[in-house]
Image: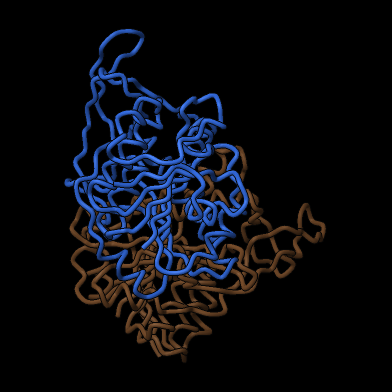
Chain colours: A blue, B brown
């Protein structure tokens, strides 16, 4: 079982990616985000994105109800159905889903966050965001068994039955763990983890749990989250996690051949 | 098997509708549109809706690629996931799908339409619209068998693998026929078919295929399409079609008790 995550950043070669995805043999789950597109569409809708910094220094999107509905539109609508259409055109019987559907991922909503705005601590309320606590693999397993390719995206469902914004990499990790995936491929617009973030030649080709602390030292910003999620996945039984480049031809084949950064036990 | 179609018009009591939908026993498929919301969101995105009149006098939406992507956002994103969220909150294990997913509905794209604009005949190209030619019930049957409630919406998939805008009532008819539904309930913001469109007291309570011609005489505009689709459904084996009011409390229970307009053989 292969879990493939594609981030929504600039420079990604979607046509090459879908061409390669159509060649994957055996059961696979495809997970995507839509962060960059959400910023664009939110601005066009007149609800500019609001990114806040938590007291611990982490930056995240503040997801009020209007932004959550924009997320439905972008993640579950435009991005998900464009990918499903592209896969169907290539003969792959894809089924697009959010993690709300069939209660694939449920978790707790954290409606208030302590944030720093203009240098001052503030309590922001009305956030529709949360963390995944449980994966129900029933629907995914049913679809895989019937030969479909699930194409999955946030949001997830809160325990109170509200949609919640959850991190796409975390969703991929939790799904890979729940389904006992051999491999989790995490694609973005970099070659993998870089020792020097400004130098694409400084790729770290392999990390083991033993030298994880060093890798976490290299990782900055969003990449730090990805490394922690990968570590978590491997510790919980996923065979290996590969960070790979989605800007190149044959991106999935290359990643499976050893390009990118491999994280193993 | 019950197929329930809800149009996206003003005045609909969504909370009452979902409350009642959560009480339905036995297998059901819920189909929705999003026409009114698409107009609103398209305007906010700066791509105002373009409705064209065909040479035969029928009005339809001209769906260029940008509008199709707005349709992904509104139908498959905002409307579909808001309904799924509302159902999940009520304990119904809903799965939201477009007719692209699992190739539920496929048909032929008609990319050019002969239309009248400003009184002059014109050939408009680049339309992503088409008519459904085939329903593949595999995915719906799989989900129903596992106890899920499918929540289905246009677009469908063209034979060339492009998304196409298809009529929601037609999608409901084709799904009801393909799954051998006993009943197809078609909800909108009117009590049913009215003999006098301006008088809600002039409800036509029953139509049989024998007096269909008379009913078609009453029906105007969009209602005419609905009556023809209902006739088609009944002729092809659906037990009965009911046009009913989605503005009231217990709308589904009332429709099943005999409110609205019933079309039978």
- Could you tell me which residue is drawn at 81 percent across and 61 percent down? B121
Please count the marks in the image. 0
Q: Report which quarter residue A15 is drawn in.
A: bottom right
Quadrant where the N terminus of chain A sits is: bottom left
Residue A152 position within the rendered picture, expressed as x and y whole percent measured from the top left: 39, 55
| Residue A217 vertical placement versus B25 (above, below) | above
Q: Nearer the viewer, residue B37 or A20?
A: A20
| Residue B233 vertical placement versus A32 (above, below) | below
- Could you tell me which residue is drawn at 35 percent across and 49 percent down? A172
| Residue A165 vertical placement versus B104 (above, below) | above
Q: Is residue B215 visible?
A: yes
Q: Nearer the viewer, residue B171 or A122?
A: A122
Residue B119 lies left or right of residue A103; in this view the side is: right
Residue A40 lies left or right of residue B121; in this view the side is: left
- Could you tell me which residue is drawn at 39 percent across and 70 percent down? B186
Q: Nearer the viewer, residue B247 or B205?
A: B247
Q: Report which quarter residue B180 is drawn in.
A: bottom left
Residue B259 position within the rendered picture, expressed as x and y whole percent measured from the top left: 28, 72
Residue B117 position within the rendered picture, expressed as x and y whole percent measured from the top left: 76, 55
Q: Is residue B36 visible?
A: no
Residue A258 position within the rendered picture, expressed as x and y whole percent measured from the top left: 49, 50
| Residue extending farthest front | A210
């Amino acid at each position: 079982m292969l879990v493939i995550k594609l981030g929504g950043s600039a420079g990604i070669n979607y046509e090459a990616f879908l061409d390669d995805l159509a060649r994957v043999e055996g059961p696979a789950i495809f997970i995507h985000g839509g962060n960059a597109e959400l910023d664009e569409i939110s601005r066009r809708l007149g609800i500019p994105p609001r990114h806040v910094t938590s007291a611990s220094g982490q930056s995240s999107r503040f997801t009020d109800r209007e932004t959550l509905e924009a997320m439905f539109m972008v993640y579950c609508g435009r991005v998900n159905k464009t990918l499903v259409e592209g896969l169907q055109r290539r003969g792959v019987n894809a089924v697009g889903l959010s993690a709300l559907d069939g209660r694939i991922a449920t978790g707790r909503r954290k409606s208030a966050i302590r944030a720093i705005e203009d240098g001052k601590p503030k309590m922001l309320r009305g956030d529709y965001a949360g963390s995944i606590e449980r994966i129900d693999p029933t629907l995914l397993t049913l679809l895989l068994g019937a030969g479909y390719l699930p194409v999955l995206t946030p949001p997830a469902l809160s325990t109170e039955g509200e949609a919640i914004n959850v991190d796409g990499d975390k969703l991929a990790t939790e799904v890979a763990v729940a389904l006992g995936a051999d491999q989790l491929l995490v694609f973005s617009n970099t070659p993998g983890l870089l020792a020097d973030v400004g130098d694409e030649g400084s790729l770290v080709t392999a990390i083991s749990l033993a030298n994880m602390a060093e890798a976490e030292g290299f990782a900055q910003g969003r990449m730090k989250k990805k490394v922690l999620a990968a570590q978590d996945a491997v510790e919980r039984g996923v065979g290996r996690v590969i960070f790979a480049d989605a800007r190149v031809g044959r991106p999935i084949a290359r990643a499976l051949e050893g390009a990118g950064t491999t994280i193993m036990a």
